[in-house]
Amino acid sequence: MPPAENSPINVKLLLIGNSSVGKSSLLLRFSDAQWLPEDESSATIGVDFRVHKMNVNGKKVKLSIWDTAGQERFRTITSSYYRGAQGIILVYDVANRDSFDALPRWYSELETYVSSSVVKILVGNKVDKEFSRQVSTTEGQQFAQRMNSLFVEASAKTSVGVKEAFEEVVSKIIDTPELWASVGDKGAKTPKRSDATSATGGMPGNIDLSADQSTQADGGCGC
Ligand code: GDP
């Protein structure tokens, strides 16, 4: 059943990509308008998820945005991390060629775990490091096109492109009702805070996504 007229559409977004490309930083920048200086955020800060409310084309949207919390370092992202996602944000670092070269592996993981209708956006992060860029904008753009993904370059540090990246992916999801209208709440439940793993290296994939959203306190809500 479609959600009631004035209840928000629940959308689940995932961040994936190599370690240290700036996934947590992008999430903090978007949801909390926050930037931790490089030396304070050495390893993944341990963000697990954020809830963010926004309006898109006159529709209320409740976003839950999930970060890997470092799982990718061990190449063990659990299949449950991907469950119910309507949008995927694939991140690489424009100043780190390896993180770009790793993208085919991330896309093949997506083929295994998510439906092809899920909206994907490729984000080339750290454009503030223009002086040490290793991947050109054109190369990023062309790759994204081949992979049927949206594309944005961004910097969590300066906030260039960050809002746009999240807004573009959400807007395309909203334009694709089959991603949310038929599933209602099912696709993007937000877990109870008490069920969430700790902020230090927890595995979001292990959180009980069947928790009743109405009773939870929006983990780490920056809204
Ligand atoms: P994650 O492992 O992908 O979640 O990456 P983090 O968000 O933990 O970031 C890894 C490192 O890159 C940290 O030192 C961040 O401060 C730094 N970083 C993240 N985003 C940017 C950016 O846009 N520009 C620059 N210069 N550094 C960034």
Image (tube, rainbow, N blue to C red):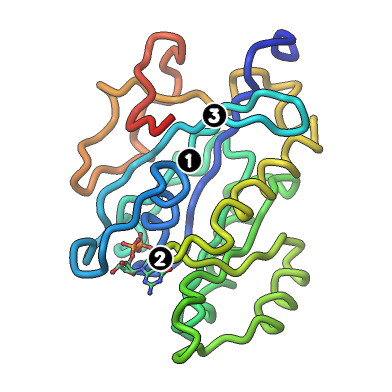
Element class at badge 1: strand
Q: Which amino acid type is marked by label 2?
A: Lys
Total marks shown come to 3
Q: Where residue 188 sits: x, y (%)?
A: 55, 28
Q: Quadrant of residue 86?
A: top right
Question: Which residue occupies the foreground of this view, 115 or 197?
Answer: 197
Element class at badge 2: loop
Q: Which image quarter is the N terminus in?
A: top right
Residue wearing tag 2:
157
Tell me whether the residue at label 3 lies in contact with that at label 1, contact meaning CB atoms closer than 8 angstroms. no
Q: Where residue 202 sits: x, y (%)?
A: 25, 43
In the rendered view, would you say 60 is above or below 132? above
At 19% from the left edge and 69% from the top edge, which residue is drawn? 39
In the rendered view, would you say 220 is above or below 157? above
Q: Which amino acid type is marked by label 3?
A: Lys
At 54% from the left edge and 57% from the top edge, which residue is drawn? 162
The disc at residue 78 is none
Q: Check mark 3 vs ligand 1: CB closer than 8 Å? yes or no.
A: no
Residue wearing tag 1:
65
Question: Which residue occupies the foreground of this view, 10 or 31?
Answer: 31
Q: Check mark 2 vs ligand 1: CB closer than 8 Å? yes or no.
A: yes
**First in residue order: circle 2 vs circle 1:** 1
Q: Which amino acid type is marked by label 1?
A: Ile
Residue wearing tag 3:
53
